[in-house]
Amino acid sequence: MKAVVQRVTHASVSVRREIVGQISQGLMVLIGIGPNDTAEAAEKMAKKLVNLRIFSDDDGKMNLSVDDIRGEMLIVSQFTLYGDTQKGNRPSFVNAAPPEIAEPLYEKLVESVAIQGIRVATGEFGADMQVTLVNDGPVTLLLEVSG
């Protein structure tokens, strides 16, 4: 399971020109799911996201988590994180999990974050979405878990 995580002051996702999810300060997470990912991987990723210390403390050090700052999380499915561009110029997505595997794991991730007390907003799985955000810092990280 792969994630692009951005520290944001606010973010939103729209489907058919209507906002379906939005947050204020917190994390914007684009999540890619591979064919061998499991519910265990979703739970590991959720714990990692909730506890990731990328918000500044009083000394200006990245020492606080989204939980510590009482922030929010916007999680959007992003199968293109598994795009392979090693051959040619057109990405291949054969390494991404098919929707029947990916969607339940995406939902498990969202549920696992919410259970930890974080307010979660989402996009619409499989939809054509437009994401708007203000990256704070900018801080952007790539995460990968297995399990």
Image (cartoon, rainbow, N blue to C red):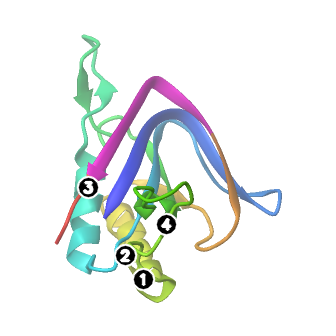
Camera-nearest label, 4 or 1: 4
Tell me where the magenta segment starts and ends, as one range: 133-143
Q: Amino acid at mark 2?
A: Lys
**Residue 73 located left or right of residue 130:** left
Sequence-wise first label, 3 or 1: 1
Q: What distance separates the C-alpha of mark 4 from that of mark 2?
A: 16 Å
Q: How far across and down, in percent of the image, does residue 103 sit?
A: 47, 80
The reply to whether dot 1 and dot 2 touch (C-beta < 8 Å) is: yes
Q: How far across and down, in percent of the image, does residue 123 sit?
A: 60, 63
Camera-nearest label, 4 or 2: 4
Q: Which residue is mark 2?
A: 108
Q: How far across and down, in percent of the image, does residue 92 sit?
A: 49, 67
Label number found at residue 63? none
Q: Which residue is mark 1?
A: 104
Other residues around mark 2 within 10 Å, as few (<14) / some (14–19) / many (≥20):
some
Q: How far across and down, in percent of the image, does residue 61 sit?
A: 24, 17
Label number found at residue 144? 3
Q: Amino acid at mark 3?
A: Glu
Residue at position x 37%, y 75% in the image: 108
